Image: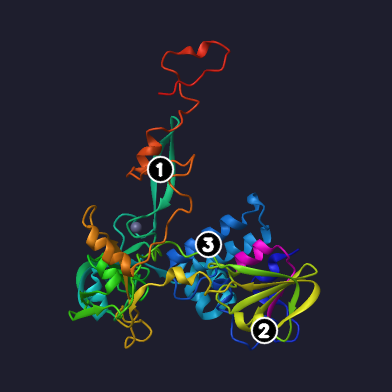
Amino acid sequence: MDPRMFFGGGGFGGGGGGGSPFGGMRQRSAPADTQGLYNILGVSKDDDTKTIKRAFRKLAKKNHPDRGGNSAVFQEISKAWEILGDEEKRAMYDKHGEEGVKQQGQRGGHRQKRGPDAKATIRLTLEQLYKGHQRKLRVQRTVIDKDSKMTCRRCHGRGVVIQQVQMMGMIQRMQSQCDHCGGQGHSFRSSKKSETLDVHVPKGAKDGYKQKFSEKADEIPDGVAGDVIVLVDQQPHKTFQRKGDDLYITRTISLSDALCGFSTEVKTLDGRTLIVKSKPGDVLEPTTYEPFADDAEISWDEFSNTDVDGLEDLAKGQLADVDKIKSVLAPGGQLHGKGISAFVIRRGHVIFKKCTRDQAVAAQVSRDGSTLYIVGDPKAGSLGRMLKAVPGEGMPRGANPFENGNLFISFEVEFPAAGALNATAQAALLACVPKKCAPTTSEDDGGVEVVQLVDVDAHKSYENNKPVESDEEDEEGRGGGGQAQECCVM
Ligand SMILES: [Zn+2]
């Protein structure tokens, strides 16, 4: 078994009939592959270093040889991170692929030195992100007058300084790089200059949106200035919560609102007022779906002695470990998002099929020894995720600012207080809302006990009667005897 088949280069050896995009890559004249390393870590080119680091850590943990992972796979992951985690190497990789990074490494000291990047964070409200935001940002930077070259006063042009260090009773002379001139032997006159950066945050930009100002950080004497990176920090909002392009609000409604319809006012982020009404006759149920909980993993349906015919093979691998295959297809895996909705395991090999779920379901054929996996039906369980929404009243979509996400409303239903419904009201209610729970046994039957519900704090109920921990020292210190102690239950 060699899971390296999954990674990089021509590993995905031309699958069956369909031309694999991974198969037989890189001819001499072909453009360099600048995507493979992103695929290995399951990230996209737009992701920032933090996201890439997170993906790397997750994969490295999962595939670490100390935890039974394959060391070849681990090396691939590490190599991808070594390049994508380094801004310079990553920039070179994006332009010229791995070959470019290799050459950059060989040129070694000859490449131009870059000063450190500077970061600036701007805090923006949801209103500002909704409408888009422009700001002039004043920054102070060191600029260097490159015509003012003068010999370094500290090292007198040698670039190194001799220091006397006392070590273990002996005086040693040590030579080190002059930190005044960075070992250049000369220095320049520098000054502080204030500069204005035009920050432009587009409509619908997300938390963490970045704008880069090339070479606008402090100048350095022996290289180019680093970049100034302006980062958007989205501030929490008192009414709306954001998830992607969707907005969420919570409304508490009364039981009669829930049963008979309701309307509520929502002030939009661009200052409009919406009157939101439920559909006539609609009954609103309390929301159980938690939109801000983690998304569940992809589920797969298994069909034994089944294969599919006529679908495109995207990739093949010499691997039959179902969990590993699933993890490659899961979010963060390197085949995630490649349109694979089915895979077949046959004789120790896996074949990934590029298709939709419906196509895979339709293409099933029975074949002894093959096991088919089809991505789970996304509609199954979606009933619990149904929320009331106002379409198009979410955030502007970054890709198309004329289109918006949705505005979801979660409902909390407030019930009438105890005793609020008198017999007449109850009779009226019963006439239209049927009863559901009624015992089939008569109260008068022998052996039947009639009990009443009361309110109990479930948390306290447990806490107050928690089992005593067995390793706790008894206060009286009866520990001496060899006999097992008996717990004293209050
Ligand atoms: Zn110096």
Where is residue 349? Give x, y as percent: 76, 70
Q: Which mark is residue 362?
A: 2
Identify the magenta region.
314-328
Marks 1 and 3, how far apart in space?
61 Å
Give the residue drawn at x 35%, y 39%.
Answer: 460
Q: Is residue 320 magenta?
A: yes
Few, some or many residues within 10 Å of mark 3 (<14, 14–19, 20+): many
Q: Is residue 335 magenta?
A: no
Mark 2 element type: helix
Marks 2 and 1, how far apart in space?
56 Å
In depth, the one of 414 and 421 nearer the eye is 421
Residue most extreme to the top: 481
Reading the chain from its start, which is encountered first: label 2 or label 1? Answer: 2
Mark 1 element type: loop
- In the rendered image, which quarter contains the C terminus? top left
Where is residue 421? Give x, y as percent: 23, 58
